[in-house]
Image: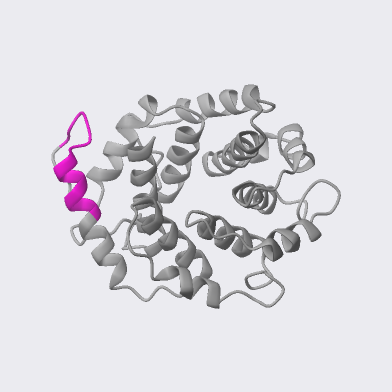
Amino acid sequence: MKPEKHNKMSNNLEFDIVKNSFEWLSAQRIQSVKELSSTLSAHALWELPNPYITRLILEQDNDGSWNSSIRDTARASSALSTEGIVFTASARWLLARKKENFWNRDVYDTAYALAALADMGTQNKDGCNWLSENYCPAWEQIGTTSLIITALKKQDNLTKTRTFETFIQEKARWILSKKRLDGGWIHISTSNLAIQALLLAGFKDEVEDSVNWLLENVHENGAWGNKGDDINATALTLSTLGLYKKS
């Protein structure tokens, strides 16, 4: 289903789409930490009853991690923080796995960890420096750059500084330069990461057409996905719409 194009997000259209999408999500078997985290965040941003909090907490390991995975632990920690829940054991677990100034010498692990630490109120400037100083052509992808922007901006917001603002603005404008004429960046999940990063960086007006593109690409049953229906893509999109509404 593709609703008629509109210049501004209609409140009625938004309500209908969001309502249908949450109904679709509630009927799915949501089991992985990634899906639980994104679904929990979507409910939190729309201030809905959140049965996924308990389910996600029950998946936590005794050491404070989720699946002994940096990304799962970061995703879960960030999601729970949207409901004001912070486990210091999870922050300690993440910090204990940082070697030198990075996590696994991996851009994704490092970006996810830094964003989660910021969400939990923990500063880590060395990790931020590693991301900004080692940015290279291999990282010049929409999703990767969006995750880096999100991590750096959250850390800057935490410390109430603008240490990485020049870098953030430069990369945000690069992401905008890659936006298609229809407002999207090809893939639903990648587009969501881009829109969320750009909203965080202060580019709300520039992503209005991107939000409309999301609304125009919802499936008839209320789900989103590149081909079939996808739980994570749907939850990410609901979070994006919630963030846009709150910005």
Residue 24 in picture, x, y percent from top left: 26, 66
Q: Is 86 left or right of 235, judged from the image as shown? A: right
Residue 131, located in which quarter of the rendered image? top right
Residue 207 in picture, x, y percent from top left: 37, 31
Residue sitting at 36 percent across and 25 percent down?
205
Which quarter shows the C terminus? top left
Residue 60 in picture, x, y percent from top left: 60, 74
Specify the segment rendered in magenta.
Answer: 5-18
Residue sitting at 58 percent across and 28 percent down?
171
Q: Nearer the viewer, residue 135 or 196?
A: 196
Residue 224 in picture, x, y percent from top left: 31, 56
233 part of magenta stretch: no
Residue 124, located in which quarter of the rendered image? top right
Residue sitting at 32 percent across and 59 percent down?
48
Residue 153 in view of the camera: yes
Q: Nearer the viewer, residue 240 or 92?
A: 92
Q: How is the image coloured?
A: one colour
